Image (cartoon, rainbow, N blue to C red):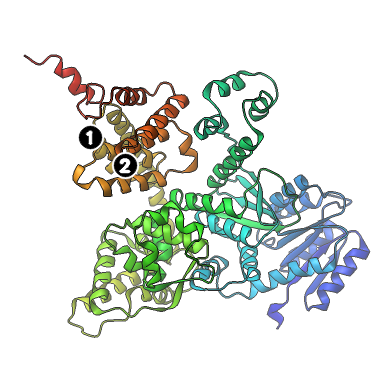
Amino acid sequence: MEDSKIKILVLEDDSTLGEALKEAFTRVGHQVFLVTEPEKATEVINKEKIDMLFIDCLLPQIMGIDYVTKIRQEMPSKTRFKVVLMSGIYTDKDFIQDATKKTQAVGFLRKPFDLNEALKLVKVDESNRKEEASPRRSLYQIFGRNMVSNREKRKLIEALEEVSGFDLPFVYSLLVETKSSGHLNIYGVDGNVSGVSLSNGVIVGVDIEDKTTYLGEMLIQSGYAIVEDVQEALNDKSPRRLGQRMIQGNKLSPHAFDLILTEQMNIRLSRTIVDQMIRINFASVEVEMIEPSIDSDSLSYFLHDWIASKLSANWLKSMHMMWASYRITRSSTYREDHPALKMSLIQSLEGFTDHLDRGVTLMDLLGQPGYHEAAVHKAIHFLLTKGLIAFSKSQVVVSPQEQLKTLRKIFTEIQGKNHFQVVEYFGLGQETVASVSGMVEEFLPVLGAQPKDPKSEAYKLWTQIRQRVTEACTSYLDAGQRQQYKQNNMKSEAENKLRATSLLEEAKKALELNQYSKAMNFMNQVVELNPAIAQVHLYNAWAKVGTLDPAKKIQQLKDIEFELMQVPPDERYDAIFPFVTGLVQKAKGDISGARKSFEKCLALSSSMIVARRELNLLASGSNKQDDILNMDLKKMVSGFFKKK
């Protein structure tokens, strides 16, 4: 078919290689334009809709990288083609990584190369062009399949262009799982470029704009070094890095330092996982294996933490909504002793794996007593990302009573939402769609079959929800209304964040004075205004520890532990984290663990008076709320002036 032909431009001043590429591409049915000068290439780009550009990095008139950058600036509408770089001189890993970043190249061929390597890159692009679904939608269709080959997974990765930052944990998992080698380049809306390098499925490099190290804090928290040794190394004015100073001073083992550097990579990877659309491209190229690195086993633990702490419950809910009524089944890789099933998200939901054995739906799990909605979504997403479960292709036939329960829940949750929030709730606005009917058709499986009795409550709710979604989709597809909503939403989010920040400061003051109920009230408002604000889970956990009800202590402690599970990796190296951890340990009766946590807190910040107060309490053996060192300080002071 004519439509399946790819138009390829080869810009190569080596006529022998250029002719060889042209012949190879033409032989498999593609249209090829071979030029040796940048000016001729520009003429072709101006006349033809080019799909791929193979370009030499070193041309007589201009560097190939500079040409790609220049032509994209001058002709943005004509240069949406894929770029493959070629070079026999510039082949070191730093140049390759930098070049693929600047040009957003999908491949780098080191000369001399086998023509089959070039043909493979073209074949991948050809396959991607034939896909009817968008690459991002195809990515998540994996969740509805029990068996997916590595070849299919690689195709999905190579086809991805625009994704959500929240998609990255799944992307990282697939790159490692398929033993990929190359550079994943990530382009943020602010213009920043991040890079992740892989060698045969092992992450060996993370390059991001924020170079914060946390090395000192990590060494202290991990127990690999004491605060005095870290401080001494920091005061050393030699040009050597902190770790080198401590290793050479016999204050730190090389193995421990490698573990800390791996944790640093974890933190930097976590910072790429943001709630905004980003552009990515993966350039396949050989990458040298170096240490420190993150292999498949280590990545499982990091994936767990990223999904628990970085992905919002609302995003996950909209992502999973389409499968809410589909049976959850085990994949071929599921096994009872799989390490992923022992991790905190899964263990926090009592009897979770037993429910999976019964082939329940997501709706069933969300209805289980004692299950936190966010915890269910995060646990399911983690197991889906690990490929241990899948959503079956057929919906579960539910009873009229169960359907009514679901309809009531949905109807209640969309009340008070505007059209665009309704679209987001059902996850319908994450892809480009052609029509209202197409969007509505996609969402209908969530509601189940239309009830037969027109007089029944279920029929009325089903009809009202469908009508509401139809109206919402109509508004969403109006470009003007959508743009207006985005502007209003940005303004509202900015105002809410400002108000939430102010309330969080009030909550901190109340917590330091042990005014827990007051702090809890502030924190409830903070979560309502901006649940993604920094340190929200830390201070929420602190407030909840202070308001424990002895009659509900077991369940409340589970909620608090889930709060701590949602603390992002970089926030765990703030002194507040070991302090709150100590409070939880103390509430559970682990006095030794609590003491160690409070000591770590003071090692990180000697000004934490609340931690010193708690240590004094533990030393005195007191655990009463009205102890003079633990009571509301205002209450304590006023007590001195009461009449006897």
Outermost residue to the bottom: 452
Outermost residue to the left: 644
Q: Are marks 1 and 2 in contact (CB under 8 Å)?
A: no
Residue 128 lies in what quarter of the image? bottom right
Write down the residue under mark 2. 526
Q: CA distance from mark 1 to mark 2?
A: 13 Å
Q: Secondary structure at mark 2?
A: helix
Residue 484 seen in the figure = no
Pick the residue in front: 319 or 516: 516
> Amino acid type of disc 2?
Val
- Rendered location of residue 536, percent (x, y): 37, 41
- Rendered location of residue 569, percent (x, y): 49, 42
Label drawn at residue 518? 1
Image quadrant occupied by the C terminus: top left
- Rendered location of residue 269, percent (x, y): 57, 47
- Rendered location of residue 276, percent (x, y): 49, 52
Q: Secondary structure at mark 1?
A: helix
Image quadrant occupied by the N terminus: bottom right
Residue 620 lies in what quarter of the image? top left
Pick the residue in front: 394 or 51: 394
Q: Residues within 10 Å of mark 2 (few under 14, many from 20)?
A: many
> Amino acid type of disc 1?
Lys
Residue 362 vs 625, above or below: the answer is below
| Residue at the spot 68% in from the left edge and 28% down from the top edge | 244
Relative to 186, is 319 on the left or the right?
A: left
